[in-house]
Image: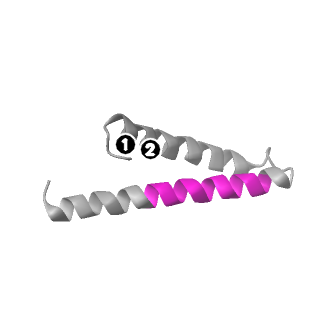
Amino acid sequence: MDEHRLEAFEKMLAAVQEEYANIITRMEKLKAEGKVKTVTYQQLMARKMMYQNMLSMYQIYGLTE
């Protein structure tokens, strides 16, 4: 993998990890407000699962620490 490609991968991984953390934070806030049945919460749940799957794939292939 050339240097540019490796750098792009590292940026993507960091963005996925950051977005996953942001989703968790937003979900916790909505849960604390008792809004777990809202459309927003359900959309966040779907996005959380998608990002969680991506992070799991990175782990399976040994691309994360």
According to the image, label 1 marks what residue? Answer: 58
Q: Which segment is the magenta one?
A: 15-30
The residue positioned 60% from the left and 59% from the top of the image is 22
Does dot 2 land on a helix, a strand or a loop? helix
Residues at marks 2 and 1 touching, judged by CB atoms closer than 8 Å = yes
Classed neighbour count for the residue bearing mark 2: other residues with Cα under 10 Å, few (<14), some (14–19), many (≥20): some
- Residue extending farthest to the top is 60
Q: Residue at x 18, y 65 (%)?
A: 4
Give percent across and percent down for residue 24.
64, 52
> In front here: 16 or 39?
16
Q: Disc 1 residue type?
A: Tyr
Judge left or right: residue 15 versus residue 21. left
Residue beneath the point at 85% across and 55% down: 33
Per the image, the residue denoted by label 2 is 55
- In the picture provided, is 34 more to the left or to the right than 59? right
Report the coloring of the rendering: one colour
At mark 1, the secondary structure is helix
Name the residue rendered at 53%, 58% in the picture.
Answer: 19
Residue type highlighted by circle 2: Leu
| Residue 12 rendering spot, x and y as whole percentages | 36, 59
Q: Quadrant of residue 49?
A: top right
Q: Is residue 13 magenta?
A: no
* Relative horizontal placement of residue 56, taking residue 62 as reference (left or right): right
